[in-house]
Amino acid sequence: MINGIPVLIVVSAVVITVLLGMMLVLHRASLRLQKQLEFWHELLERTTVGILIVSPERRIIEVNRRLCEMSGYSREELVGQSAEIMHLDRTQFERFRQWFDNARSDGPLMQIEYQYRRKDGSTFWGVISGGALVLPDGNMGVVWSLTDISDKKQTEADLAIERSHMQTLFEVNGSGMLVVSSIRQILQVNRQFCNLFGYSREELVGQSARVLHVDQQHYEDWAPRFQEAKAGFPIASADYPWRRKDGTVFWCFFAGVKMQLPSGESG
């Protein structure tokens, strides 16, 4: 006994106090952890990119709201399924394994443009990137971020069609057409231009426009006209001599206008 108080009671009171203190600390830590989990979950849900977490077996463990919106599936329909559910077919699913293995091994970060299938069977283009993630069970999975780029792909397709139309018009034009860079290097010619000068397209593209002029003086005399056209002032010239591949000289009407080249420079 201590001061008339049984030792067992004193020890028990101390133990209870310590346990209560530990429980309070653990409770507070649990609350902090819960708040952190809620924060990250809210962040996951509000992000504008689709998030997909998959297991080593490529089964879907978690998705966010944006991923569900893109795919047309609910979270309940996706979690637990093979990621194959979002691929166009089995072949594409297997082909994608190389990028999955790269991401899971924490290889170089890559962005891949890939086509996926929605629940309704329609397809969409996405750009996807992923990295290794340690899962709650200790295994190494992959977290993917997916951005829908269908609008971008449609714009590219529309531009390709327009470019094809312009190329057709360029080729079937009855006049010879020539595109040169700011340093007067030949970038493109059409069929009629080749017929006029006796060269093939391969012989002209990449050459200096000097090859078309009668001589060096002629080439230099034409420079001011070229600069005027490049500055945005359309030029036209009648009765101007040019030299064919075989050395013969012929006269033709030549007109030029400024154009923006794919490189961004003016030609």
Image (cartoon, helix red, strand yellow):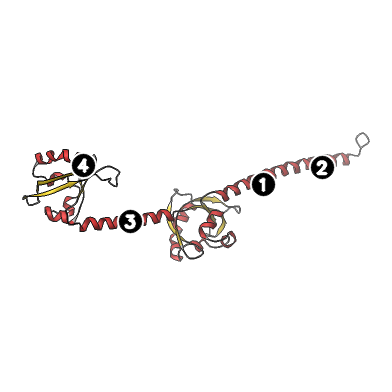
Q: Report the front residue among 146 and 58.
A: 146
Q: Which residue is mark 3?
A: 160
Question: In whole angstroms, how far apart are the C-alphas of marks 1 and 4?
Answer: 69 Å
Q: Report the front residue among 85 and 166.
A: 166
Mark 1, other Cα within 10 Å: few <14 / some 14–19 / many ≥20: few
Amino acid residing under circle 1: Gln
Q: Residue at x 48, y 49 (%)?
A: 106
Q: Which residue is mark 1?
A: 34
Q: Secondary structure at mark 3?
A: helix
Question: In whole angstroms, how far apart are the C-alphas of marks 3 and 2?
Answer: 77 Å
The dot on residue 16 is 2
Q: Earlier in the sequence, mark 2 or mark 1?
A: 2
Question: In whole angstroms, how far apart are the C-alphas of marks 2 and 4?
Answer: 93 Å
Amino acid residing under circle 2: Ile
Question: In whole angstroms, how far apart are the C-alphas of marks 3 and 1?
Answer: 51 Å
Q: Which residue is mark 4?
A: 229
Q: Earlier in the sequence, mark 3 or mark 1?
A: 1
Q: Nearer the viewer, mark 2 or mark 4?
A: 4
Where is residue 220 drawn, in percent x and y?
13, 38
Q: Are marks 2 and 1 in contact (CB under 8 Å)?
A: no
